[in-house]
């Protein structure tokens, strides 16, 4: 095989490679910007297994509070029970560590309304 | 966010110092016997760079638990520190410290044995980059790891040689300085394309598609390539203009050469800092 063929083959091999990089969020419940009744859990789905290392929930105008305990295992789908939430705008923040050692932060916003006014959402 | 800023600052500073230490070890392996007036200063600079790099690496490692929790108090969390301790980052740190230790030993020892230990230390140090991060988990690791190692070795050789060249041009006789610059430039002609193709190969493998170039990781990658282009201009100036001028002598030849080398050094340092930001906060596919 000539050098040119080796180089072409190598280049093609590189171009078709699929990266497995940081765990990034693929889905979340409640969804970003959702408005609805108070969710009982938050479910985060990631592109690859990740370990949740920190999670805080902040209601607008209040101090953020840590959510504990956090699951100790790595998973692609992480479910965390939420405390009873009163109506308001919330910011959920978290940090996960993926298998390659990278720390990946994330944030999600949702609004809780009175049950009678909730039209679905989260 | 302050934890993240502190972490990336430590990471960038560790890149600058560890590549400097490795680069000086590689430079001495090739040129030690030619440069009696410069070698003592290079040994001192290499030693200081290696010691600072080791301190920065340990500090950065301790801060990982804080990054995991999002606050400095996380450094005191035994669960998170345990997680860090059992991670690939700890293995990587061990190899980097071993590499720096070997470089330090090589800088203290005289002759062929010292130079050999220094080169082995540099290889160990640079190989540690393949233990963690994007390339370490990719299905094509067998291909990406050698590419990354090649890319980093050329960076260490190039970046690490600039400070020595700066010192050589002011401490050695003009004909010696010109000869060393000429030999460095002759190697660079071969090494720079290797650096470029290894870097582009890694990018082609890690970026999922061309659209990824519009996201932060891709944009920082473009910034690195642009910086590389500017470096090429400076390297060409040294190769064909300021390097030969050193040999001819003249009142400003040394000053002009050192000015361009200092600019090259600053640009390469900036590229290393961009790399630290890119690999800390962003991913090729997000």
Image: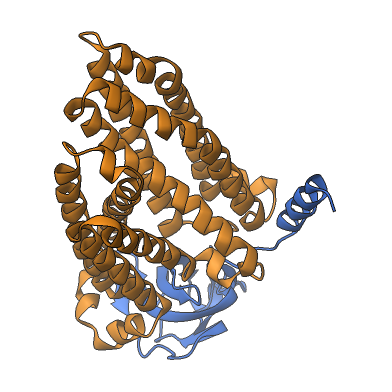
Chain in orange colour: B
Residue B187 in the image: x percent, y percent?
48, 37
Callout count = 0
Query: Residue B132 or A106: which is nearer the viewer?
Result: B132
Query: Residue A19 or B168: which is nearer the viewer?
Result: B168
Question: In the image as oriented, which residue stretches furthest toward the top?
Answer: B250
Image quarter where the C terminus of chain B lies is bottom right
Instruction: Identify the image's colour scheme: rainbow, by chain, secondary structure or one colour.
Output: by chain
Image quarter where the N terminus of chain B lies is bottom left
Q: Quadrant of residue B177?
A: top left
Q: Is residue A52 above or below residue A15?
A: below
Query: Residue A15 or A70: which is nearer the viewer?
Result: A15
**Left/right of residue B228 with respect to residue B175 in the rendered view:** right
Residue drawn at (41%, 34%) of the image? B184
Chain in blue colour: A
Residue B82 in the image: x percent, y percent?
31, 87
Q: Quadrant of residue B196?
A: top right
Q: Is residue B185 above or below residue B39?
A: above
Residue A50 in the image: x percent, y percent?
51, 79
Q: Is residue B75 visible?
A: yes
Residue drawn at (71%, 61%) of the image? A17
Residue drawn at (33%, 40%) of the image? B161
Residue drawn at (58%, 49%) of the image? B198
Q: Is residue A32 visible?
A: no
Query: Residue B13 or A104: which is nearer the viewer?
Result: B13
Residue B135 in the image: x percent, y percent?
55, 65
Question: In the image as oriented, which residue stretches furthest toward the right?
Answer: A1
């Amino acid at each position: 095989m000539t050098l040119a063929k080796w180089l072409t083959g190598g280049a093609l091999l590189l171009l078709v490679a699929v990266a497995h990089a940081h765990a990034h969020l693929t889905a979340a419940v409640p969804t970003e910007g959702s408005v609805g009744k108070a969710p009982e859990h938050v479910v985060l789905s990631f592109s690859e297994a990740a370990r949740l290392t920190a999670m805080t929930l902040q209601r607008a105008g209040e101090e953020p509070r840590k959510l504990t305990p956090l699951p100790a295992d790595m998973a692609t789908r992480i479910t965390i029970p939420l405390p009873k939430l009163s109506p308001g705008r919330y910011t959920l923040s978290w940090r996960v560590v993926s298998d390659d050692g990278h720390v990946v932060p994330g944030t999600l916003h949702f609004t809780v309304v009175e049950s009678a006014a909730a039209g679905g959402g989260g | 966010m302050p934890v993240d800023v502190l972490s990336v600052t430590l990471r960038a500073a560790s890149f600058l110092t560890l590549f400097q230490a490795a680069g000086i070890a590689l430079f001495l392996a090739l040129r030690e016997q030619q440069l009696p007036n410069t070698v003592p200063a290079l040994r001192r600079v290499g030693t200081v760079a290696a010691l600072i790099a080791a301190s920065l690496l340990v500090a950065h490692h301790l801060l990982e638990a804080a990054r995991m929790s999002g606050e400095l108090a996380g450094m005191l969390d035994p669960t998170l520190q345990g997680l860090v301790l059992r991670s690939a980052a700890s293995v990587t740190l061990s190899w980097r410290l071993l590499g720096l230790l070997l470089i330090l030993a090589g800088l203290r020892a005289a002759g062929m044995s010292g130079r050999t230990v220094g080169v082995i230390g540099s290889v160990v140090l640079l190989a540690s980059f393949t233990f963690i991060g994007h390339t370490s988990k990719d299905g094509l690791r067998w291909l990406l790891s050698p590419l990354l190692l090649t890319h980093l070795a050329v960076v260490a050789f190039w970046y690490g040689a600039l400070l020595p060249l700066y010192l050589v041009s002011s401490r050695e006789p003009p004909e010696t300085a010109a000869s060393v610059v000429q030999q460095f430039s002759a190697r660079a002609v071969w090494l720079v394309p290797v650096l470029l193709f290894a870097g582009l190969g890694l990018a082609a493998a890690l970026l999922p598609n061309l659209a990824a170039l519009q996201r932060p990781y891709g944009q920082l990658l473009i910034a690195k390539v642009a910086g590389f282009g500017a470096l090429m201009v400076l390297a060409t100036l040294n190769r064909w203009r300021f390097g030969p001028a050193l040999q001819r002598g003249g009142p400003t030849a040394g000053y002009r050469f050192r000015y361009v080398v200092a600019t090259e050094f600053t640009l390469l340092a900036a590229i290393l800092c961009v790399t630290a930001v890119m690999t800390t906060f962003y991913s090729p596919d997000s």
